[in-house]
């Protein structure tokens, strides 16, 4: 049961790191836009499934769709994503100049990072609740004794406390990175 909790928590922490990598900072990074969903041919697809996204330089992204008809839908999806990016369409590609972060934008991005950390903590609490139910059920089914239940609950709580500390450490590191000029 504790192994399952650790596995779920590790997945949650990896997801948080992945989400943090999407946050716009001062450098252009393809992962900033690859996940954005674009409506094309009646379905939603992430940009990475429709185009090659690469860095032109440290401040510029270039997106080259495999189908020319996707240029305008991709540009529209990027504009509507809320990332504050302004895509420039060419005949068969899109260029995005990543603007430097203003103090106001840094604070907005920091709030987004804090919300992501809070969501990760909620997820960790949900893992705790699920595993506690499994432990209680095992005791009710006479698979474990009361002492074993208490030991498992204590070990689980240590695991949860450690996970919450890691989430908070990730947030502090990301916040420092965001607020750095």
Image: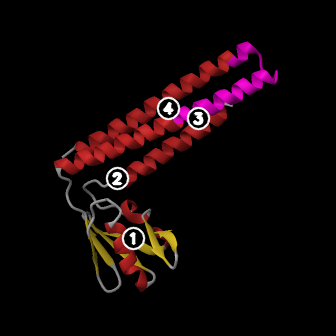
The residue to which callout 2 is attached is: 23
Residue at image location 33% in from the left, 38% down from the top: 173
Between disc 4 and disc 2, whose residue precedes? 2
Give the secondary structure at mark 3. Answer: helix
Q: Answer yes or no: do the residues labelled 1 and 2 have beta carbons within 8 Å?
A: no
- The label nearer to you, 1 versus 3, is 3
Measuring from the top left, give residue 4's x and y in whole percent.
65, 36
Q: Disc 1 to disc 2, how far (Cα)? A: 16 Å
Q: Disc 1 to disc 3, how far (Cα)? A: 36 Å
Between disc 4 and disc 3, whose residue precedes? 3
Q: Residues within 10 Å of mark 3 (few under 14, many from 20)?
A: many
Q: What stretch is highlighted in magenta?
A: 124-149
Q: In this view, does 172 lie to the left or right of 123?
A: left
The residue to which callout 4 is attached is: 163
- The label nearer to you, 1 versus 2, is 2
Q: Residue 127 carries which label?
A: 3
Magenta stretch: dominant secondary structure: helix
Q: Disc 4 to disc 3, how far (Cα)? A: 11 Å
Q: Which mark is residue 53?
A: 1
Q: Disc 2 to disc 3, how far (Cα)? A: 26 Å
Q: Looking at this view, is 47 or 30 the one in front?
A: 47
Does residue 101 sit above or below 168 in this rendering? below
Q: Disc 4 to disc 2, how far (Cα)? A: 22 Å
Q: Disc 1 to disc 4, how far (Cα)? A: 34 Å
Q: Answer yes or no: do the residues labelled 4 and 3 have beta carbons within 8 Å?
A: yes
């Amino acid at each position: 049961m504790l192994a399952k909790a650790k596995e779920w928590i590790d997945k949650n922490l990896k997801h948080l790191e992945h989400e943090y990598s999407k946050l716009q900072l001062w450098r252009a990074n393809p992962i900033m836009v690859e996940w954005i969903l674009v409506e094309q041919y009646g379905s939603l697809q992430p940009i990475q499934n429709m185009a090659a996204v690469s860095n032109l330089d440290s401040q510029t992204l270039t997106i080259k769709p495999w189908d020319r008809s996707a240029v305008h839908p991709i540009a529209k999806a990027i504009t509507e994503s809320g990332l504050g990016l302004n895509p420039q369409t060419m005949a068969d590609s899109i260029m995005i100049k990543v603007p430097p972060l203003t103090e106001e934008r840094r604070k907005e991005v920091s709030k987004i990072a804090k919300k992501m950390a809070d969501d990760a903590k909620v997820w960790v609490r949900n893992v705790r609740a699920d595993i506690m139910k499994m432990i209680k059920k095992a005791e009710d089914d006479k698979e474990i004794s009361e002492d074993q239940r208490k030991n498992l609950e204590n070990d689980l709580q240590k695991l949860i406390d450690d996970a919450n500390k890691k989430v908070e450490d990730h947030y502090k590191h990301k916040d420092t990175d965001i607020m750095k000029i």
